Amino acid sequence: MAVMVTGGAGYIGSHMAWKLVEAGESVVVVDRLSTGFDWAVPAEAELIVADIADQDLIQAAMREHAVDAVIHFAGSIIVSESVADPLAYYLNNTVASRSLIESAVRSGVSGFIFSSTAAVYGSPAEIPVREGAALLPESPYGTSKLMTEMMLRDAAAAHGLRYAALRYFNVAGADPEGRIGQSTEGATHLIKVAAEAATGKRDHMTVFGTDYPTPDGTCIRDYIHVSDLVEAHYLALQRLRAGGGNLVANCGYGSGYSVLEVIDAVKRVAGRDFDVRLQDRRPGDAVAIVANSDLARRELGWSPRYDDLETIVAHALRWEEILRARNTATPLRRSGVSAA
Ligand code: UFG
């Protein structure tokens, strides 16, 4: 029995792979390394460098490793990029996921856990938002993920696949033990960008939009620590293996912070000031989005450990320092759990 982790060389997927290996699972990572890093994958996991849409290869790997569950992270994740290049998002997210779901069905995989997103709600009428709220994505990114949720629902009904779609709010932070973190080049996510500014990787950062209908005019988000998110997936895996039913659940903490509040937190925790410039709104951004996560807590027994903005920021900053200190002349290598 093994778990296939797609996108397992990327930010969230690599944290998942480490968690699974630590829990004694056999792990097969599939990643084409377009944005991920082979060194982020624990040495104990098998790394297959491939496209998730390569059905022959994926089905052979599923059979060879007796994969009973897929945790599907691979995909494109930048809201503004999806507005500029929607067809790339439908290809990388929706079309590739369709292939992967078909491979899972054909190979007799019984459980499927999918990285969905809060972006499926757009700007909800009420926050914190519950799973039953209207699904009105405001970007092709959100739509591409919603379409995948729908395919999973229908494939589950027709073919007996069981699934969990976890709708992530804003994922941030890094492994509390400092082994991995968000290493993406040219990252666009707020806490990552602010951490780069605080540690000197960039000389300034920009706030996109200060005229939103919020108390300080900037967008509000619910920031969740990557390790808590990974824990929710692990619990979902156990639930599916125990015969639990399909689940679509929010993963966030239920607390909203504005862009300016987050930047203040980064400056405070880093103990450093940096240049912040104000600009117009970024296309595709929703005004305010905060999770109601009662369902995940109830159905998965999920109990977050790092529900604190300063802790998230501190871990993100520490990872930024680790990346900075590494000598880029020495290629990073994959390492194992025991050596960490
Ligand atoms: N922001 C800035 N400056 C930056 C980066 C971001 O002002 O340099 C602002 C954005 O405009 C937005 C907020 O910070 O208002 C958060 O932006 P992110 O890029 O960090 O994240 P998004 O909310 O756009 O999207 C993220 C994930 C999605 C997920 C969504 C859920 O990328 O996958 O959170 O809310 F769906």
Image (spheres, rainbow, N blue to C red):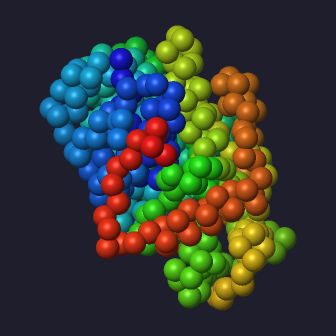
Q: Where is residue 223 in the image (x, y as percent from the top left)?
A: 68, 55
Of all residues, the one furthest to the front in this rendering is: 339
Identified at 36% across, 66% down, the residue is 85
Identify which residue, 117 or 181, lies in the foreground: 181
**Residue 114 higher or lower than 199, as above or below:** above
**Residue 82 higher or lower than 186, as above or below:** above
**Residue 334 higher or lower than 54, as above or below:** below
Of all residues, the one furthest to the top in this rendering is: 243
Residue 153 visible? The answer is: no
Q: Position of residue 310 (x, y in %)?
A: 76, 60
Residue 47: image quadrant is top left
Identified at 45% across, 62% down, the residue is 183
Identified at 75% across, 77% down, the residue is 271
117 left or right of 87 in image: right
For the image, the number of numbered tags is: 0
Q: Position of residue 294 (x, y in %)?
A: 75, 33
Identify which residue, 129 or 34, lies in the foreground: 34
Q: Position of residue 94 (x, y in %)?
A: 36, 45
Identify which residue, 238 or 270, lies in the foreground: 270
Of all residues, the one furthest to the left in this rendering is: 56
Identified at 62% across, 74% down, the residue is 194
Q: Quadrant of the N terminus?
A: top left
Q: Ligand 1: give its quadrant.
A: bottom right
Residue 82 visible? The answer is: yes
